[in-house]
Image: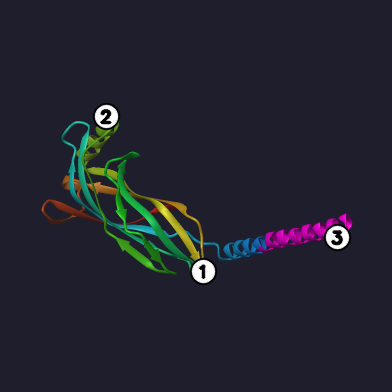
Amino acid sequence: MSVKECDHHKGKKKKIFRRLFFGIIIFLFIILLTILIVWAILRPTKPTFILQDVTVYAFNATVPNLLTSNFQVTLSSRNPNDKIGVYYDQLDTYVSYRSQQITLRTAIPPSYQGHKEVDVWSPFVYGNNVPVAPYNFVGLSQDQSNGNVLVDVKVDGRVRWKVGTFISGRYHIYVHCPAYITFGAQSNGISVGNNAVKYQLVQRCSVNV
């Protein structure tokens, strides 16, 4: 075989590989474009969360700069989408006061939420002798003396969207639910035994995804 024939065959192979390479790129581009178009048409709406109630089993701030608390919170989540499911891969619930976390995090079991479905969770969140910043402790003591304490029930986690057989990557979800806890003569809670008081709130939460 002459040198010219070898060069000719090499040139043909290069053209075949080049066409194959560009064919794969175009194919992947079409798939990605199709996914983006479907995603843009469906436009997933973030879930809605409602804080149904809070039961307070303990709320003790008698020791300076330390707080012991025990809550059971009932949260409902609704998927408003017609054709998009939601995977809750990770959800952690905790309570904060003036932007300071005052309980440990409690994990909610992973779950899948279908179209228009509603899920309800009732986790316990608590903290024993949790250090509180001095300026927050002063405010907490004053609020408790006034009979009205505003705490925040928060949910922090990761979700994925399911469209048909396509499942998206993970997105961070952050839920913020303000809750007013009343004490003493101003208390509007219901006693449920063992010094526990239940507050019916039905408070809509802010959701960021």
Which percent across, then down, holds residue 182?
22, 47
Q: Earlier in the sequence, mark 1 or mark 3?
A: 3
Q: Is residue 143 visible?
A: yes
Q: Nearer the viewer, residue 180 or 121?
A: 121
Sequence-wise first label, 3 or 2:
3
Tag 1: amino acid: Thr
The amino acid marked with disc number 2 is Pro
Residue at 29% across, 30% down: 135
- The residue at which mark 1 appears reads as 165
Residue 122 x, y percent position in the rendering: 27, 58
Quick check: 64 above or below 110?
above
**Residue farthest along the left direction in this orientation:** 194
Q: Position of residue 173 (x, y in %)?
A: 43, 52
| Rendered-image quadrant of the N terminus | bottom right
Seen as rendered, the residue at the extreme top is 134
Residue 1 is labelled as 3
Q: CA distance from mark 2 to mark 1?
A: 52 Å
Left or right: where 172 falls relative to 203: right
Residue 128 vertical position relative to residue 167 in the rendered view, above or below: above
Task: Rate crowding at label 2 as few (under 14), some (14 to 19) or many (20 or more) other CA atoms within 10 Å.
Answer: few
Residue 40 lies in quadrant: bottom right
Q: Residue 74 in the image: x percent, y percent?
A: 28, 58
Check disc 3 and report its element: helix, strand or loop: loop
Q: Are marks 3 and 2 in contact (CB under 8 Å)?
A: no
Q: Secondary structure at mark 1?
A: loop
Which residue is the site of mark 2? 134
Mark 2 or 1, nearer chain start: 2
Question: Is residue 146 covered in magenta?
Answer: no
